Amino acid sequence: MKKTLTKRDLVKYLHEELGFSARSLARVVDLLFEEIKRALERGEEVKIVRFGIFEPYQRPTRKGVSPQDGSPILIQGKKTAVFRPSPTLKEFINR
């Protein structure tokens, strides 16, 4: 079964490595993710060297088919975020 790294796991790892309180580290992790979200909301890229780039992306409006009756419909575009891994991260993953 595939393992998932959670925020709790990150806090535990930082606590073991740095020795700061888990509560303080949880706050730091929360603040980090909040700032990434705010930057994306403002339309900014978030570049983390040797890790990758988070960037806002506007999905275009597209044609679709209604599942109820098969008639053509327009599916409205929406804002989302994408992540592009750095070459360093790609290389690390593919070792």
Image: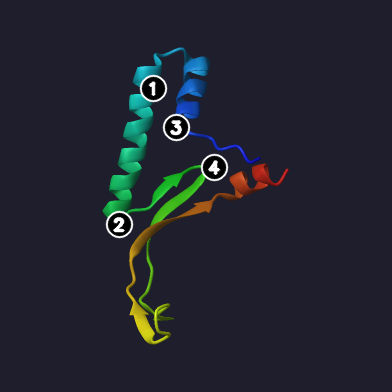
| Closer to the camera in the image, 10 or 85 | 10
Q: Which residue is mark 1?
A: 25
Q: Residues within 10 Å of mark 3 (few under 14, many from 20)?
A: few
Q: Which residue is mark 4?
A: 50
Q: Is residue 94 rendered to the left or right of residue 89? A: right
The reply to whether callout 3 and callout 2 are in contact (CB within 8 Å) is no
- Disc 3 marks a residue whose amino acid type is Lys
Helix, strand or loop under label 4: loop
Q: Which residue is mark 2?
A: 43
Q: Nearer the viewer, mark 3 or mark 4?
A: 3
Distance between mark 1 and mark 3 Cα atoms: 10 Å
Which of marks 2 and 3 precedes in the sequence? Answer: 3
Helix, strand or loop under label 1: helix
Residue 7 badge: 3
Which of marks 4 and 3 precedes in the sequence? Answer: 3
Distance between mark 3 and mark 4 Cα atoms: 21 Å
Q: Image height check: is 55 above or below 50?
A: below
- Disc 4 marks a residue whose amino acid type is Arg
Q: Image height check: is 94 above or below 63?
A: above
| Residue at screen point 66% across, 44% down | 93
